[in-house]
Amino acid sequence: MLNKAWYFFLVVACCNIFPVQAGDQLSTRSARARRAFEQATAAWRMRDFNQTVASLHQAIGFDNNFFEAQLLLGEVYFTSGDFSKSIQPYRRAIEIKPGLFPQARFYLASALLRTGSYQESKEQFLVFIELPGISERLRNASLAGIETCRFALHAMANPVPFEPRNLGPEINSPLPEYSPTLTADEHTLIYTRKIPSDNRPGHPDRFQEDFFITRRDNGQWLASENMGNTINTAGNEGAQTLTPDGQHLFFTACNRPDGFGSCDIYYSKWTGNGWSTPRNIGPMVNSHVWDSQPSISSDGRRLFFASARAGGQGEMDIWYSEKSLSGEWGPPQNLGVAVNTPGREMSPFIHSDGKTLYFASNGHIGMGGLDLFISRADDSGNWSTPVNLGYPINSFADEFSLIVGASGINAYFASDFHEGFGDTDLYHFELYKEARPTSVTYMRGVVFDKLTLERLRADFQLTDLETGLPLAVSASDPITGKFLVAIPTGKPLALTVERAGYLFFSEHFSYAETRTGADPYLRDIPLQPISVGETVVLRNIFFDTGKFDLRPESEIELHKLAELLHRNPGMMIEISGHTDNVGSLDYNLELSRNRARSVLQFLVKSGVAVGRLTFEGYADTRPIDTNLTEQGRANNRRTEFRITQF
């Protein structure tokens, strides 16, 4: 639903509110007031705000009943966004000549709404729509204003839990800080800071935007640092997003030589020693207009962003682009009418659960400016009707750039409405339960060579065993071998780790509870170099009890095995099936042999030459664990492959 509050704000902000009278038509008899007013109108035509305001105050000082001066002063403040200062001159103009320019009451009501005086704003709108001769445009805008006021009053009477806490002096400064982004463990924070420009000598009022980074240690944020010249330039960098592992950075930069529009989206990758030189992600995503505020999904394959491009629902929409298996970004798609409106939608943040979207909008019903909303995607990818996050998270001011940690508990945002260290500061708060995403935890550890203990870079893929869809694609650090993978809770998952020249590692698991940054799941992963005689347990091969038909979720692992064989055409393997000691030996031998044969048949259908494969069933003759416990028996029920030639 379109929040026409934004519509009426466009109406009032885009046009002069009254025809400036001249000469004897002015309401004042003071010659000095007239001269000051003429100076003000001349300055206003030149868009000299300071001189206009000074001259109008001078004119009003000479004659407080100067109707045109009061009205123009209200317009000057209103169109510059200083709504609070516009209220008194509008109110005074109405008192002086209530019927001369009835639209003044509309602008007074609008200014009251934008400063949170909802009850009086509603009353002024109600009076205005009863006046004769008002335009249909302003009547509709007034009805929207009344709707907004009613929503806001109800929201204020039913506040949501909200206790923001400043992130502290290690992060915040007297300068503006905003646009935070986090890794999945909530231990690394990157944000934007507006700093004095060093390339404009003689212009101390000029600023630029740079990225700063900080890390949490023992629950405390360390002093933040500038991310350096590889990422930051003398221009503006901002509105960034990190993949959950912190290895891929997407951000906005404006007016660069390689840009396609006013602002474009750029990409940089962590190399182990530093960030790669940023590159424009290309004309498939970036357009000839404004493209900004990216948010990358947990699997790194869907990029959400805000754009003013044609073909959307309104002035600014949320779009997304999907990355193909070859690594190319596809044509952007509009998120649709459920999320986008004829107004402005911006600051998208897709949570690590992949289906909960937070964004800012002035096109959905809210408190009067940009409000924060939540929408959730169903299993078919359809987005739910957005829900306003409520008061006091939202207010009469503009709220945007909200992010939510992987746990779904902590939210982070920028504000200048709370006690801070200067301008806009970064805060966090505990998000109330109804507005939380699906909980996501994470696993971290180190990948290393099993024989030499050398730290390794390896590729990760986390897959939903129920759907077969990848949930995250990542890699360990090229230098340290460290990795971080976001993991949704309550789902059966398969983790595969691969590196050329090594046997792949696989595991399946399901975590019921969310871990905090202080208590992660830890899993170091040794990779075995390919060599004859090495055996690998295929941990993501599944059969029903007593059967040898492969369950569908087994295909994820089997495709990985087929890929390994295709990459190493000289490799030959034996596939073996194993059981626990329940049942007779003859029965278990036949069952284990048939299970191994099923794997072989799948590989042959996947293009592996049958001459490279053998199979055997060993029943319970080669246990790797005790058969006295259920877990031990489960470990013994397994499928393996052994390299027989390489």
Image (cartoon, helix red, strand yellow):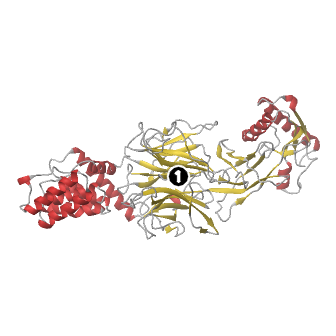
Q: What amino acid does circle 1 point to?
A: Gln
Q: Quadrant of residue 229?
A: bottom right
The local crowd at label 1, few if under 14, some if 14 to 19, many if 20 or more residues have their Cα within 10 Å, is: many
* Residue 103, placed above or below residue 264: below
Q: How many marks?
A: 1
**Viewer-nearest residue: 440 or 97:** 97
What is the x, y in percent for residue 405?
Answer: 57, 58
Asked if residue 146 is positioned above or below residue 158 in the image, the reply reads above
Instruction: Pinpoint residue 146: horizontal percent, then vertical percent.
Output: 29, 55
183 left or right of 157 in image: right
Q: Is residue 564 left or right of residue 142?
A: right
Residue beneath label 1, please? 240
What residue appears at the point 18 percent right and 61 percent down from the top-left corner?
A: 56
Q: Position of residue 12 (x, y in %)?
A: 26, 51
Q: Give residue 139's position: percent from left, percent from top.
A: 23, 48
Pick the front one: 527 or 372: 527
Determine if residue 296 is in view: yes
Which residue ends up furthest to the front in the rendered image?
A: 201
With 550 as the anchor, is 512 left or right in this view? left
Compare residues 610 and 294 and report the one nearer the observer.
294
